[in-house]
Image: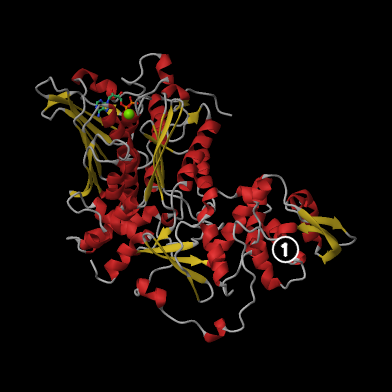
């Protein structure tokens, strides 16, 4: 082993620079944060070649005294911390005194600054860590930092840089993460002299979000707010129909600083449980304000991660705030051509084109510089990776006209199932005998599931609009704001799921002993899975005993599902058990199994419903939670708003 030696200071700084400055976007972030810390009212960011050639950030903040310029660019020198104790009450974005020194170490940095009570400014240049003399210069009050030749002396880092377009994407992202919460500040971002984005001071969050991501997203925002002692949570989450394929559009700000927090991200996805299909992620813009001493921001070089004093409590606050809001909000998906994420990219391109061109889907088509918008759209798409398909069935060129199209295949209407009616809330039904055929099993599943006292007194439907069944799978009815198309299976599945959930919250599902226990032959793996989860199955009212070899005996069955075939249900559950091996806890597994049961027991697409059954489904729809989505997160209903219909029929 060679002897141990202290590292030369230049190398120390280079290593530190590697932590803080990863790419041009990091420079943009650090310089913008400095501008905000200096109390700027306006911050102008200019980049050339995605920041690879030049990053310039100009502000009108307090400026730096000429004699302090050498300190500003020196390592571990800051005006933001005075005594050790300050580290635990950090109210500024910066505090480590590292950024300018790090940047100067690996680029050519020119810092020009003027404090307002001086007639002229002063300038210092740092190149590869070597600071020059402070020289006077003319400049407006405030500070301009210019960074060129980034990574000229760290070829390894330079190799990791991407194309200017990709780097511009990262720069835009860094820009918006600093700019979004600072509503009192006017921001601009220029690339090659072109204004990519302008955010005037004094606008609201939705207005800023609209400029950055398009008006459709801004229109789909749901405001949330809550306080828990000194902790205030406020912001916006997006309607589930506006989900994304990545978590990238989840912006979380802590005291004005963009952070990432896995636990809070998890709380957010919990809040959307059952409202998004697998692989989709919510969009959110949330801001947390709390006294600085409740959080340690000094755990990560770029301060992206922080440590909360009471992370568990914060988790609950976020989850319950959003959940409560959702329960009080009608989340039925409104069909609108612009509700597709692809439109947001278009909207974003339009939005970042500047404030004179409001970000509307229509106007983006007529952008004066359509080619530029396309280019920008490509750039943004390259980092946003959000070209995922929209969850909504596309309205198609015929749009709403498709509602009435097609009378259905005659065969579909023939030989309809004889269905018993779904019990209305006021008429709890006796459980039908098990001997009834499988067709009516589905009805019975819904029958009298919920004891009367569980039902809210307002169980009467809010509107008694008639509904028609089309294609034996959709129910078409009207609401106050338009035509509602309901997926009968998805809705029934949600109803059953909610009812099962309420039942099981009170303990277990009631089991009915089978007069003749039913043997089921399984493979060894299936049998092991069943035996491993016997207790869980018992909670579901499914009693299973070993019966020699790989055969198990079903001795009890959920009373409320009496008409489902026990072996069928068990095999559906086994499938879930096997694929859900990695499910972390039994609560989650139980929930999965409730999904399975609800899905098996619900009426299917293709089942003809009687008028009473339709009325019954619609009545249930009024009283259960989250009736707008099936338990797997697919929409259970779509609304074609009257306004949209009027627009399409050219009535307006
Ligand atoms: P930090 O922000 O952690 O203090 P920096 O290296 O980013 O460290 O900046 C060092 C110091 O230079 C800051 O503490 C501040 O006093 C001064 N400074 C940097 N940028 C600006 C600016 N835009 N306006 C006024 N002062 C600045
Ligand atoms: Mg700083």
Picture coordinates of residue 314 (x, y %)?
Answer: 50, 33
Q: Nearer the viewer, residue 143 or 359?
A: 359
Q: What element carries label 1?
A: helix
Q: Nearer the viewer, residue 645 or 58?
A: 645
Q: Residue at x 34, y 30 (%)?
A: 99
Residue 212 versus residue 4 in the image, above or below: below
Q: Nearer the viewer, residue 419 or 453?
A: 453
Q: Residue at x 63, y 51 (%)?
A: 452
Query: Is residue 589 visible from the viewing direction of this image?
Result: no
Picture coordinates of residue 139 (x, y %)?
Answer: 12, 30
Query: Is residue 515 visible from the viewing direction of this image?
Result: yes
Figure quadrant of residue 68: top left
Name the residue beneath numbered marker 1: 569
Figure quadrant of residue 465: bottom left
Q: Residue at x 18, y 27 (%)?
A: 113
Picture coordinates of residue 350 (x, y %)?
Answer: 25, 55
Q: Which residue in the rendered view is the most extreme toward the bottom?
A: 410
């Amino acid at each position: 082993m060679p002897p141990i030696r202290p590292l030369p200071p230049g190398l120390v700084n280079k290593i530190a620079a590697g932590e803080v400055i990863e790419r041009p976007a990091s420079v943009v972030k650090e310089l913008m944060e400095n501008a905000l810390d200096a109390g700027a009212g306006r911050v102008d960011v200019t980049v050339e070649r995605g920041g690879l050639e030049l990053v310039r950030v100009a502000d009108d903040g307090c400026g730096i005294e000429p004699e302090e310029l050498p300190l500003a660019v020196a390592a571990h020198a800051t005006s933001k911390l005075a005594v050790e104790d300050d580290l635990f009450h950090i109210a500024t974005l910066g505090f480590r005194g590292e950024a300018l020194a790090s940047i100067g170490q690996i680029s050519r940095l020119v810092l020009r600054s003027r404090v307002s009570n001086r007639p002229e400014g002063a300038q210092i240049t740092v190149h590869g860590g070597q600071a020059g003399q402070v020289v006077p210069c003319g400049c407006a009050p405030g500070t301009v930092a210019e960074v060129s030749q980034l990574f000229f002396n760290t070829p390894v880092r330079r190799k990791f840089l991407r194309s200017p377009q990709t780097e511009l994407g990262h720069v835009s992202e860094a820009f918006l993460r600093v700019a979004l919460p600072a509503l009192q500040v006017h921001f601009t971002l220029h690339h090659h002299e072109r204004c990519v984005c302008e955010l005037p001071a004094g606008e609201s969050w939705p207005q800023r979000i609209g400029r950055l991501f398009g008006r459709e997203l801004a229109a789909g925002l749901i405001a949330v707010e809550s306080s828990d002692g000194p902790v205030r949570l406020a912001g916006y989450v997006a309607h589930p129909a506006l989900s994304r394929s990545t978590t990238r559009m989840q912006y979380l700000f802590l005291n004005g600083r963009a952070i990432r927090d896995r636990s809070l991200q998890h709380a957010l996805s919990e809040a959307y449980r059952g409202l998004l299909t697998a692989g989709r992620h919510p969009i959110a813009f949330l801001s947390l304000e709390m006294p600085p001493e409740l959080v340690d921001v000094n755990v990560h070089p770029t301060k992206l991660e922080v440590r909360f004093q009471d992370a568990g409590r914060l988790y609950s606050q976020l989850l319950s705030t959003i959940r409560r809001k959702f329960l009080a909000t009608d989340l039925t998906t409104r069909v609108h051509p612009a509700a597709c994420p692809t439109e947001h990219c278009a909207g974003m391109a339009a939005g970042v084109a500047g404030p004179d061109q409001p970000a509307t889907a229509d106007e983006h088509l007529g952008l004066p510089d359509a080619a530029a918008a396309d280019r920008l759209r490509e750039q943004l798409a390259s980092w946003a990776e959000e070209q995922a398909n929209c969850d909504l069935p596309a309205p198609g060129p015929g749009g709403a006209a498709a509602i009435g199209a097609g009378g259905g295949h005659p065969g579909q209407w023939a030989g309809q199932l004889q269905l018993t009616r779904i019990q209305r809330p006021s008429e709890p039904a006796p459980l039908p005998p098990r001997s009834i055929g499988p067709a009516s099993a589905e009805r019975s599943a819904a029958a009298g599931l919920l004891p009367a006292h569980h039902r809210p007194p307002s169980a009467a439907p809010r509107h008694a609009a008639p509904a028609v069944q089309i294609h034996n799978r959709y129910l078409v009815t009207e609401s106050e704001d338009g035509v509602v198309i309901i997926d009968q299976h998805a809705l029934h599945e949600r109803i059953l799921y909610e009812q099962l959930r309420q039942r099981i919250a009170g303990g277990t599902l009631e089991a009915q002993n089978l007069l003749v226990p039913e043997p089921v032959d399984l493979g060894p793996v299936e049998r092991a899975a069943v035996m491993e989860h016997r207790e869980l199955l018992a909670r579901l009212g499914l009693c299973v005993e070993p019966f020699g070899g790989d055969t198990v005996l079903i001795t009890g069955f959920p009373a409320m599902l009496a008409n489902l075939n026990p072996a069928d249900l068990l095999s559906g559950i086994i499938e879930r058990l096997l694929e859900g091996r990695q499910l972390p806890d039994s609560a989650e597994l139980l929930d999965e199994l409730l999904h399975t049961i609800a899905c098996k027991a619900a009426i299917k697409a293709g089942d003809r419903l009687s008028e009473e059954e339709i009325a019954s489904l619609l009545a249930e729809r009024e009283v259960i939670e989250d009736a707008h989505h099936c338990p797997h997160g697919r929409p259970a209903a779509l609304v074609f708003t009257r306004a949209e219909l009027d627009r399409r029929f050219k009535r307006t």
